[in-house]
Image: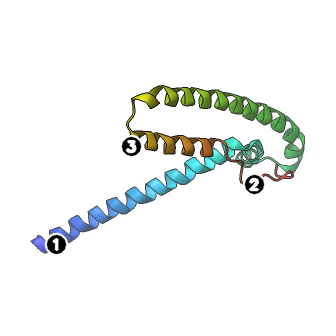
Amino acid sequence: MNVKSSAIIIVTLLLGMLIGFFIAGRLADRKIKHLEEISRDHRKEGKRLAERLMLTENQLDSLKPIMQDHLKAKHHLMNEHRNEMDSLRNEMFNSIRPKLDKKQLNRLERMQNRAESRAHRPPKHDRPNHF
């Protein structure tokens, strides 16, 4: 095998690895965003559960109220604990703030703003008839 052929094979393998790396990252990011969205809206979680169980219309009609009640309670509990976690995170930020320099304080501020905007954004599809 000559040098040119070896170089083509190595470049092809590296390109394949690079493309695979970015595709895997995008797919993982989409999955995480989808799960975050579901975790913020009990109706979406109920709809997804019904789809995965392949419920019939009769089953869906009888199970929908049960699932809604339990999923609402679950999401209420998650929100309650999310608030506690937000408080703990803010306490930590306030405790470390005096030991940071100006550049680190700016970075901490951006991190805190991003965390707060992510934690408190409303669900995208807030429709009353959605599951």
Q: Residues within 10 Å of mark 1 (few under 14, many from 20)?
A: few
Verify CB contact (< 8 Å) between mark 2 and mark 3. Answer: no
Tag 1 secondary structure: helix
Q: Residue at x 76, y 46 (%)?
A: 50
Q: Nearer the viewer, residue 74 or 59?
A: 74
Number of numbered labels in the structure image? 3
Verify CB contact (< 8 Å) between mark 2 and mark 1. Answer: no
> Left or right: 9 with respect to 82?
left
Q: Look at mark 3 in the image and give the residue it sits on.
A: 103
- Mark 2–mark 1 Cα distance, whole angstroms, equals 53 Å
Q: What amino acid does circle 2 point to? A: His
Residue 6 at x, y = what percent?
A: 16, 68
Q: What amino acid does circle 1 point to? A: Ser
Q: Look at mark 1 in the image and give the residue it sits on.
A: 5
User: Residue 117, labelled with which disc?
Assistant: none
- Mark 2–mark 3 Cα distance, whole angstroms, equals 38 Å
- Mark 1–mark 3 Cα distance, whole angstroms, equals 50 Å
Tag 2 secondary structure: loop
Position of residue 72 relative to residue 41, above or below, is above
Q: What amino acid does circle 3 point to? A: Lys
User: Residue 125, labelled with which disc?
Assistant: 2
Q: Residues within 10 Å of mark 3 (few under 14, many from 20)?
A: few
Residue 41 at x, y = what percent?
A: 73, 44
Tag 3 secondary structure: helix
